[in-house]
Image (tube, rainbow, N blue to C red):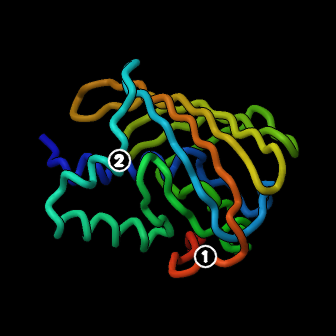
Amino acid sequence: MLSRAARLALVLSALAVAIPSVGAQTVPPIKPGLWEIKSEREVDGKKAADPGEQMKNLPPEVRAKVEAMMKEKGVGMGEGGVNRVCLSRESLDQGRWQGQSDNCKTDFTSRSTSSWKWRSVCTKPESESDGEAVFANSENYTVRSDMKTKIQGQERLTRTLISARWMGNSCGDIKPVQPKG
């Protein structure tokens, strides 16, 4: 059985890859800078616990390690399902605006200036997902995704809704999401 910290890290990683990586030729119609990302999840039809609330229950040293790991990946953890993410022009140009995964193959079924739809198949963790990003404007977008995954032999359906809003050009002490090097 996975430890609570390992499960939490897996949940946070899954949120970070709600939209898979795409090639450098495809740039989302959003601004670089600091983004506030609010996420809500449902697992197998039940509302999932807020990762921030789960973090509160971890021993302080474990919580600090998870927060440091996420910050290193460009995610400032908050409460109530709200996190902050720093996106540089480079990370947007490299398709790293909503996470990164070299373990996924993604096919876009449609892509316009206001909406992207896709299907992904990933190997780590083993999963399949369908999703859509809707760009209201360069400072606001939403993402809906359905992900089927297999964890320790058990299939799970995770539905995620993400609402994102641009907070400004400066990311403060949050490091930008890094493009593939």
Q: Position of residue 159 (x, y in %)?
A: 49, 29
Q: In this rendering, would 35 be left or right of 99? A: right
Vertical side of 67 occupied by 152: above or below: above
Circles 2 and 1: CB atoms closer than 8 Å: no
Q: Position of residue 21 (x, y in %)?
A: 61, 54
Which residue sits at x=60%, y=57%?
36
Q: Residue furthest bottom?
A: 173
Q: In this rendering, would 88 be left or right of 76? A: right
Q: Which residue is mark 1?
A: 171
Q: Residue furthest top?
A: 45
Q: In this rendering, would 6 be left or right of 180? A: left
Q: Position of residue 82 (x, y in %)?
A: 50, 52
Quadrant in the picture for the C terminus: bottom right
How far apart in space, not on screen, are marks 2 and 1 (Cα)? 22 Å
Q: Which residue is mark 2?
A: 51
Q: Position of residue 131 (x, y in %)?
A: 62, 33
